Amino acid sequence: MLRSKDIDTLGAFAADYDAAGARTFACLLYTLDKWESALYWWRFAAGAGDELAAHLLAVHHAAVGRSTDARLWRAVARMMGFAAERHLPLPVRGTTELALGFARTWDRTLQSFLQHNHLPRELAAH
């Protein structure tokens, strides 16, 4: 319940939240297969102006076959100014190998998506 004396806490929250931190937390949740929670925090970060979070939402929805949502988030990311060359992180290592014990067993659909880059036309277009 919101009380009048609680209104000051909103100002403190607005001053302390960090969109990049919310995006990073969402990425951690996603790697732990906590997709619903990750989507929540990506939407929070995107709503706070994080272009990369909007892009990650587009990629997730494209990967799971929700092309309408993927197109929506792709458009949002573009309107926010997302640019792959500016926003996508550079690999820490020079190889594409995952850290030992990091990856779970992927099914063939996900492997095919990652290997063959079958993105929906709307998501892959520049």
Image (spheres, rainbow, N blue to C red):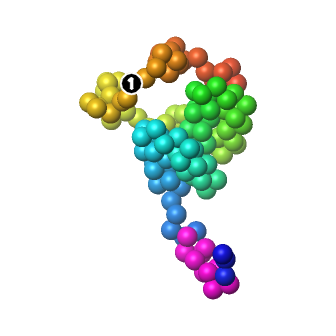
Q: Is residue 20 visible?
A: no
Q: Position of residue 114 (x, y in %)?
A: 49, 20
Q: For the stretch drawn in magenta, what is the main secondary structure?
A: helix
Residue at 48%, 16% (x, y): give it. Answer: 108
Residue range highlighted in magenta: 4-13
Q: Position of residue 96 (x, y in %)?
A: 35, 24
Residue at 52%, 34% (x, y): give it. Answer: 85
Q: Is residue 26 above or below residue 95?
A: below
Q: Is residue 117 visible?
A: yes
Q: Amino acid at mark 1?
A: Thr
Dividing the picture into quadrants, the one containing residue 3 is bottom right
Residue at 37%, 33% (x, y): give it. Answer: 91
Residue at 53%, 55% (x, y): give it. Answer: 19
Give the side of residue 53 with respect to residue 77, left or right.
Answer: left
Secondary structure beneath disc 1?
loop
Residue at the left extreme? 100
- Split into 4 quadrants, where in the image is the N terminus? bottom right
Q: Is residue 7 magenta?
A: yes
Q: Which residue is mark 1?
A: 105
Dividing the picture into quadrants, the one containing residue 68 is top right
The residue lying toward the viewer, choosing from 59 and 64, is 64
